[in-house]
Amino acid sequence: EMYQAYTDYYGMMDLIEEMYRTVALKVCGTDTVPYQGNEIEIGKPWKRMTMKEAVKEYTGLDYDSWTSDADAVAQAKTKHAEIADTATKGEVLIELFEEFVEEKLIQPTIIYDYPVENSPLAKRKPTDPAFTERFEYFINACEFGNAFSELNDPIDQRERFTKQVMEKRKQGANAQIDEDFLTALEYGLPPTGGLGMGLDRFVMLLTDSASIRDVLLFPTMKPLSD
């Protein structure tokens, strides 16, 4: 993980592209690398799409045309998607993306502006509070990392934590609000971009390895008794 003060998720997008390109050139001598039968073009500008744009491009369903949660569920079911009847518009969008879009993202692609429903630590978009300043990037139909503009509003964060804890308790989990984290936020956090990258997956990409076990320094081993 890494964090940078006084930047946002756009800064993290630029950083991860530059990092991948630089490392590929240093390690492989080229910014186009073979991976599991595909030529992955790391050096070219990565495609960037909002989640709404990606779902519309690959399914034809338009989030902005959904009039309610129930309408969103009904539209998704026309694609035979497995969606709970109680799902919100944001949850429907996420399910459609995971079911129909992710598998098609072969070349490096940044998907940004995630629904607030599954982004509890990301800052809301000022222009559309139903979405957050968050992105994930995908290569060869696999997520390689996750980043966002860090949520630095302790009031908003408490509201989201409370909702998250209530949902988990309904499922029987013994969830608690992280009061220490909220206290730290109350002291103040500057505008910050945060990034979590799958380092093992990056090594898999650079070495054309099919299994993550091939690149782990210390893979988990079974006990001798097994």
Image (spheres, grey):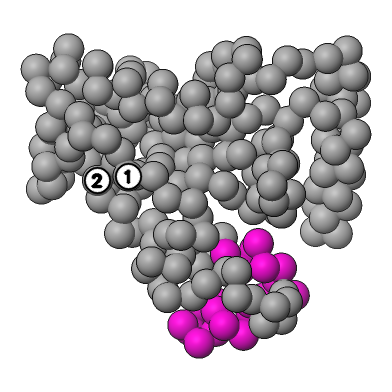
Residue ID at (48%, 25%): 12
Residue ID at (65%, 62%): 90
Secondary structure under the numbered disc 2 in the rendered image: loop
Q: Which residues are magenta?
A: 72-93
- Residue in the foreground of this view, choosing between 37 and 139: 139
Compared to 11, does 163 lie above or below? below
| Amino acid found under the numbered disc labelled 1 | Lys
How many residues crowd mark 2 within 10 Å: few (<14), some (14–19), many (20+)? some
Q: Position of residue 125 (x, y in %)?
A: 68, 43
> Which residue, given by chain and number where applicable, does mark 1 sit on?
47
Furthest residue to the front? 127
Residue 176 visible here: no
* Position of residue 123 in the picture relative to residue 111 (left or right): right
**Is the residue under label 1 in contact with that under label 2 (CB below 8 Å)?**
yes
Q: Position of residue 213 (x, y in %)?
A: 30, 32
How many residues crowd mark 1 within 10 Å: few (<14), some (14–19), many (20+)? few
Residue ID at (25%, 50%): 106
Residue 40 visible here: yes
| Amino acid found under the numbered disc labelled 2 | Gln
* Position of residue 121 in the picture relative to residue 225 (left or right): right
Magenta span includes 3: no
CA gap between label 2 and label 1 equals 8 Å
Disc number lying in front (2 or 1): 1
Q: Position of residue 214 (x, y in %)?
A: 25, 30
Q: Position of residue 24 (x, y in %)?
A: 20, 21
User: What is the number of the mark on residue 107?
Assistant: 2
